[in-house]
Image: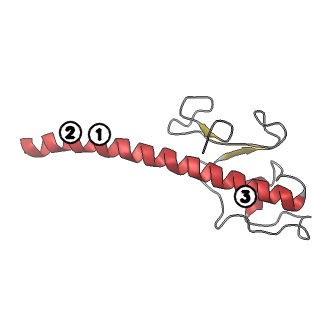
Amino acid sequence: MVIITILAAIVVPTYMGKTKKAQIAAAKNDISATATALSTFELDNGRFPTNDEGLAALFNPPTGLTSTWDGPYVAKPVVNDPWGRPYIYRCPGSHNPRSFDLLSLGEDGQEGSSDDIDNWTVSG
């Protein structure tokens, strides 16, 4: 029993660290891919989706854009980040006033904290 406890004390923190890194990487990839899809949407339609249309406009044509919408722009609807919360989309963005802000609130679920993942600081 002591050996199992010792092994758990070693393995669990290692596993949790890898899970956290994988979640962060997944959120960065989602944001990058979604930003690309939003740019393609804008090229086709002359504008980004409105706040009311949101990211759903990348998968289903918004009312009034059926003649210019050439999607779907994503393979499946953009729903939740790796922590199970919806991605936040704002257009125009406060950080990107000529386009949009797209972010995940990260593990803590609090906007403005150090674990936020967004399209204005994500690189590569």
Residue labelled with disc 2: 9
Disc marking residue 103:
none
Of the two numbered discs 2 and 3 on the same chain, state the one appearing first in sequence.
2
Q: Name the mark on residue 37.
A: 3
Quadrant the C terminus occupies: top right
Element class at badge 1: helix
Q: Nearer the viewer, mark 2 or mark 3?
A: 3
Along the polypeptide, which appears first: circle 1 or circle 3? 1
Quadrant holding the N terminus: top left
Q: Dot 2 lies on which element?
A: helix
Instruction: Say what amino acid the circle numbered 1 marks.
Output: Pro
From the viewer's perspective, is residue 15 above or below residue 114?
Answer: below
Q: Calculate the distance from the C-alpha at mark 2 to the C-alpha at mark 3.
A: 43 Å
For the point 78% across and 33% down, which residue is it? 94
| Mark 3 surroundings within 10 Å by alpha-carbon count, few (fewer than 14), some (14 through 19), many (20 or more) | some
Q: Name the residue under label 1.
A: 13
Q: Residue at x 29, y 42 (%)?
A: 14
Query: Is residue 34 found left or right of 107 in the rendered image?
Result: right
